[in-house]
Amino acid sequence: QVQLVESGGGLVQTGGSLRLFCVSSSRTFSDRVMGWFRQSPGKEREFVAAISGDGGTTLYADNARGRFTISRDNAKRTMYLQMNSLKPEDTTVYYCYAALSIAFMTQPDGWGRGTQVTVYS
């Protein structure tokens, strides 16, 4: 089973930045749509961003577009989420996921254990 491991979360002041990392064990990483969602306890999953296998297609949630940038390095089997201009409402757990297919870029087919992001005033 493919493993996805997130890192890079932490405590940051409002307006600051964090860079999240997701490392995959999949040997077919470069063929998979990858993405990020976030979820707080008791709340629904919220899509953040997704990226096609070759990096040519990206999708962003409205509240992420312009502030967050998703990218990947297939040679390193790593996906990134650069988060700038962070707000307290960005505080939650961020999960890396592998999508079902290019036709379902926002639909997780597997994910990691998450990394906590906390933004303070």
Image (cartoon, helix red, strand yellow):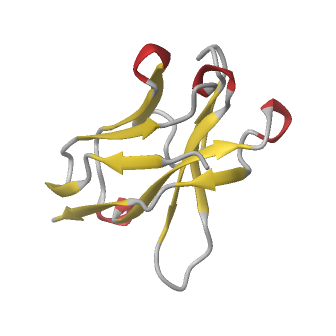
Residue at (60, 36) in percent of width and height:
34
Q: Nearer the viewer, residue 16 or 55?
A: 55
Left or right relative to 62: residue 4: left
Q: Nearer the viewer, residue 37 or 68?
A: 37
Q: Quadrant of residue 54?
A: top right
Q: Is residue 23 visible?
A: yes
Q: Quadrant of residue 14?
A: bottom left
Left or right relative to 71: residue 100: right
Residue at (21, 47) in percent of width and height:
15
Q: Quadrant of residue 114?
A: bottom left
Q: Nearer the viewer, residue 100 or 65?
A: 100
Q: State which quarter of the image contains the C terminus.
A: bottom left
Depicted 9 relative to depicted 46: above or below: above
Residue at (44, 14) in percent of width and height:
75
Q: Nearer the viewer, residue 31 or 89?
A: 31
Q: What is the total number of numbered labels drawn onto the structure image?
A: 0
Q: Is residue 62 visible?
A: no
In the image as oriented, which residue stretches furthest toward the front? 1
Q: Position of residue 62 (x, y in %)?
A: 59, 45
In the image as oriented, which residue stretches furthest toward the right? 103
Q: Position of residue 90 (x, y in %)?
A: 37, 59
Depicted 114 relative to depicted 71: above or below: below
Depicted 42 relative to depicted 25: above or below: below
